[in-house]
Amino acid sequence: MYGDGVFRTLKMRAGKPLWWEDHYRKLKHDCTVLDLLCPEPVQLLGEINALVREWPDCVVKIIVTRGEGTRGYAPPAIASSTRIVTVSPLPDYAQHSNNGAVLRWCKLRLSRQPALAGIKHLNRLENILARKEWNDSDIAEGLLCDDTGAVIGGTMTNVFTLRDGCLYTPDLSQSGIEGVARLRVLRAAKMHEIETKIQRLAASDVLSADAVFLSNSIVGIWHVAQLDDRQWHPSGWTEQLRHWIDETD
Amino acid sequence: MYGDGVFRTLKMRAGKPLWWEDHYRKLKHDCTVLDLLCPEPVQLLGEINALVREWPDCVVKIIVTRGEGTRGYAPPAIASSTRIVTVSPLPDYAQHSNNGAVLRWCKLRLSRQPALAGIKHLNRLENILARKEWNDSDIAEGLLCDDTGAVIGGTMTNVFTLRDGCLYTPDLSQSGIEGVARLRVLRAAKMHEIETKIQRLAASDVLSADAVFLSNSIVGIWHVAQLDDRQWHPSGWTEQLRHWIDETD
């Protein structure tokens, strides 16, 4: 009813849920923040396996909600939750993936709510309003800033910029979602001794970067080809990052 | 899925939906803001009447959502909506209604999002987190401030303060929900030539007021009896306001 829940979107590859450990850990973390009972991994994996038998390569969505409540905002006295697992076909992102992603700026400004920032919860009206700002399928993604002008990320992706060999990604302590793909980029960068900085990024920081990348669990890594009048040429970094986030399970 | 919808909670009295014209107008307004197809009033009234035949005095909830979408945040190409009408018993608010409401401050700070402020949409995680802060049934309601310290309202009510014969209620252009009961208080005050001011209220403005009231479509008007160490005695204003908001249909 009130978006009182969290979710995960993950990729099935040859019948296996990609990056499962990270996804489950984040699901559990997000459930804890909202005080939701998190389903056991064995239960979820059983349900996923049953669903994907005929769809070895697809998108799996896991939703955990508070379950049945009464009419008002007070949560039920006994902790319980409802889980929903759905399967859908992999979207065709070949154009953006191969040629680089063309971005736009969204007009909507994200609000700041530290109590919910980072969490992949189901209150996503801001993302929906932002995604409604364009319907040109050549535009891969819209970038969002918060009301202070800090770049937070895309409507469905996290953003990274590269400058002088250092990777930057926005601080998500006030807005945005901490995606599992972002986590894996940061972890891989650390492992390969690439300097990373999680900090405030202004629009001008993005436009003046040497390269810009988007990440999520379905698209993996997109190289950004264009934003406003700025264009970026492909570099070896895209394949490098793609390889790195898949290196470990 | 993503709380992409709006709702109304209204009171049935002797089989009639109280303040129907105002509720429908607000529903339509909120649908327009989110670009949702609003159901026709005759359709909703037919469904309400069918549901309440055996419950002439109850709470009716109307939910309008975007309807079935695809997996992502992009809305379906063809405008459609799903409507849900439910009935529940009237809550027993006699204690708060008769003796006055005991309030507390919520720790959660509301975020500011002008694109959604005022709208009774389904992204209500903030209200749920705030309502989870207490479970003492003697506490009628929790008051919420935004991140700048401006008082916005209760978790399920709008707030009014009285000072030197003037009624004040918070500016809701950044946060909060513009309830129909609030609208009716403002309209009645104007009709009866009571001065009203919609403006920023600080916590100290509430605590130093001559009287404080809460409003919504189910409780009508609550006189606030206590907040922190401050206590307020009942006055003739409570019955006056209750009478006024019910004067017109």
Image (cartoon, coloured by chain):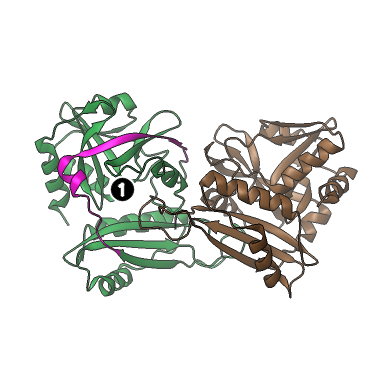
Chain colours: A green, B brown
Q: Is residue B16 left or right of residue B149?
A: right
**Location of residue B131 with respect to B173 vertically, above or below:** below
Name the residue: 38% across, 42% down: A176
**Location of residue A207 with respect to A132 vertically, above or below:** above
Q: Name the residue under label 1.
A: A179
Q: What stretch is highlighted in magenta?
A: A88-113
Give B186 or A44, whichever is nearer the viewer: B186
Q: Tell whether position B15 is magenta.
A: no
Instruction: Report whether residue B212 is seen.
Output: no
The subunit carrying tag 1 is A
What SS does tag 1 mark? loop
Name the residue: 67% across, 71% down: B51
Count the labels in the image.
1
Q: Is residue B88 left or right of residue A20?
A: right
**Location of residue B58 with respect to B206 vertically, above or below:** below
**Whole-percent x and y of residue B92?**
75, 64
